[in-house]
Structures are given as C-alpha cells and as structure tokens.
Image (cartoon, rainbow, N blue to C red):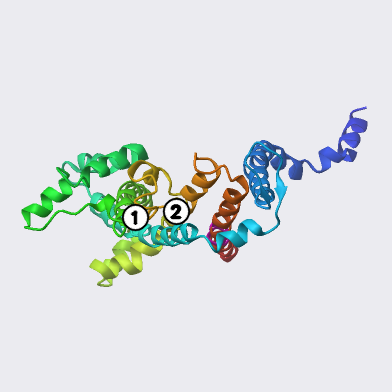
Amino acid sequence: MANASLDYQKDNWLHRNRMIITPWLFLLPGIIFFVIYVVYPIAESFRVSFYKWDGLGVPEYVGLKNYSDLFKDRAFEISLINNFKWLILYLLAIPAGLLISLFLNQNVRGIRLYKSLFFFPFVISQVVVGLVFSWFYLPNGGLLNEVLAVFGMGKINVLGDPKLATYGIIAAGLWPQTAYCMILYLTGLNSVDPEQIEAARLDGAKGSRMLWHVIIPQLKPATFIAFVVTIIGALRSFDLISIMTNGGPFGSTRVLSFYMFEKALSEYGFRMGYGAAIAVVLFLIMLCFIGYFLWSMYQDEKGR
C-alpha cells in the first residue's frame, strides 16, 4: 500500500515539478500586483495617447496627432531641456554623498551627532525641503541674500528669475538626494575588505590612489544603486517644482512630469490624450536608462 502511494506521488505532475512551481507560487502575488499597478497603466497610457479625450466624454481617435503636436510645442521643448538639466546636475549628489560618507566613516568623538545631522534631510518631506529653500531664496530677508550682502554683493531673486529658477530648485533637490547617496555609501563602506586596505598600504597606496584603486571598486554595488535611484529621481522631479515655483516664472521651471500634470489634470488642461503622450515620452526616456542598468546587472551576473 505504502509503495503504491509513493509511486502515485512520483507520477503526480505537481510532485515531479514542485521545484519549478514553488518559486513561481511565491512570486505570483507580486507579479499580479505588478501587472495591475504597473503594466496595465503603462499600456493604457500608450492607448490614450492616440485619442483626443477630456476624461469625461467619448474619446476621439486622432492617431499620432498628439505626438506631432508635441514637437511644435515650445513648452514641451523647455520641459524636456529642464529634464536633462535635472538629469546632469542631480548626479552631483553621488560624489557629494561619497565624500560625506568618507568623512563620517570614522571612529571619533561626536561622529554620531554629525551623522544624525547629515541624515536629517533624508527623513524630511520634499514639501518641507521646498519650503525651507523658498525661504532661503527670499529676495527680502532670505538667508542667501543676507550672506551675499556680507560679501558686498547685490540681491538676487533666484526663484523669480527664469534663468536661475531651475538651478535653484535643483540645488534644493540635491540636499536630500546627497543624504540618500551618503547612506548608501556608508552601508557600502562597512563591507570594504580591511585586508585589501592593509595590503594596499603595504604597497604604498594612500590618499586618492587608495580611494580610486581600492575603495571605490569595492563600492560598485552602492554606486550602481545610487546611479539608478538618482537618475530615476531626476526624471520624476515634481514635488519641489510644485511647491517652490508651480512651474513658473513663465513656465521656465516645468519638467515633463509637471507639464503632463498641467495638461492632463490641472484646471488649465484636461487634455488626457496629450498628457498621455507626454507620459509616454517620459517613459521611453526612463526605459533607456532602466534597460541599460538591467543589461549591466545581467552582464555582472553572467561574469560571476
């Protein structure tokens, strides 16, 4: 009887394939949520981008007209350029975070207090960061102009000047992003091999040579995550722009995500199809970076 039961289990398809099925059963809830909350909205955005729709009435199919209108839209061009400014300048958070983490990775008296102070911008909300920097940039009574006055320089209205406003918001965004990169590197520095450091010292390496040839290569996983998160954060920038300038002055601080919101959902828009076309362009830009990072991860895994 017992032998018959064992034979039945061996012949059972589920029993024979349990090593393949079990991981998929664990992944299934996550896959379902990913399809519902990520894949479906992306596919729906592509679909809506081919329609003229105010969100309430009957959608009218217009083909690629929304996309052709984008390339004639000066506001879209400014938003795209601003996104690339964010993308390039936001990367400064990575070396800044590395330098601060190297400073904080020491066993000296009071270092926990310094760490707490540097952690602080990471735990506060983007809204608070935006308000703090708005006060900092105030033309009358703002700390920035008070400091400039000490050096005999004239007042500047950072958020009121179309040429400076975007850079002022990016500087505000760098504050919490640098703290985030610093935390990643502090975690990475805990896993640096002390034997390699000691061997490099015996070979005469120190200072920048030690940092470049011994420490930074061991921080590659932290650097990879810092790049991914920083680039995606730069392309998703919205909160600070909304709080500090609301896209102004004269639309000079808009980025694609903010312009999409204005066109699709704000009181000036309700052009769902046009907003969806902006979202698709932003998604394709992000896809280039995400695809590159996934390819890099695959190559690293293959090389091990």
Amino acid under disc 2: Val
Name the residue: 15% across, 53% down. 155
Amino acid at the residue labelled 1: Thr
Residue 194 in sight here: yes
Q: Which residue is mark 2?
A: 255
Residues 126 and 135: in front is: 135
Task: Please name the residue shown 54% across and 55% down the image.
Answer: 282
Can residue 289 be found in the magenta stretch?
Answer: yes
At 33% from the left and 46% from the top, the residue drawn is 176
- Viewport quadrant of the N terminus: top right
From what the image shows, is residue 133 above or below residue 298?
A: above
* Mark 1, residue position: 166
Indicate yes or no whether the magenta region holds residue 226: no
Q: Which residues are magenta?
A: 286-291
Residue 128 location, quadrant:
top left
Instruction: Give the image location of residue 90, x and y in percent.
Output: 37, 57
By secondary structure, the bulk of the magenta-drawn segment is best described as helix
Q: Which type of secondary structure does the marked residue at label 2 adopt?
A: loop
**Disc 2 or 1, which lies upstream in sequence?**
1
Locate residue 213 relative to residue 42 in the image: left or right: left
For the residue pair 193 and 225, the one nearer the viewer reads as 225
Image coordinates of residue 151 in percent, x first then y, are 7, 57
**Residue 165: horizontal and vertical position, in percent?**
31, 54
Which label is found at residue 32?
Answer: none
Q: Residue at x 23, y 40 (%)?
A: 112
Residues tagged 2 and 1 counted as in contact (Cβ below 8 A) = no
Q: Is residue 162 left or right of residue 299?
A: left
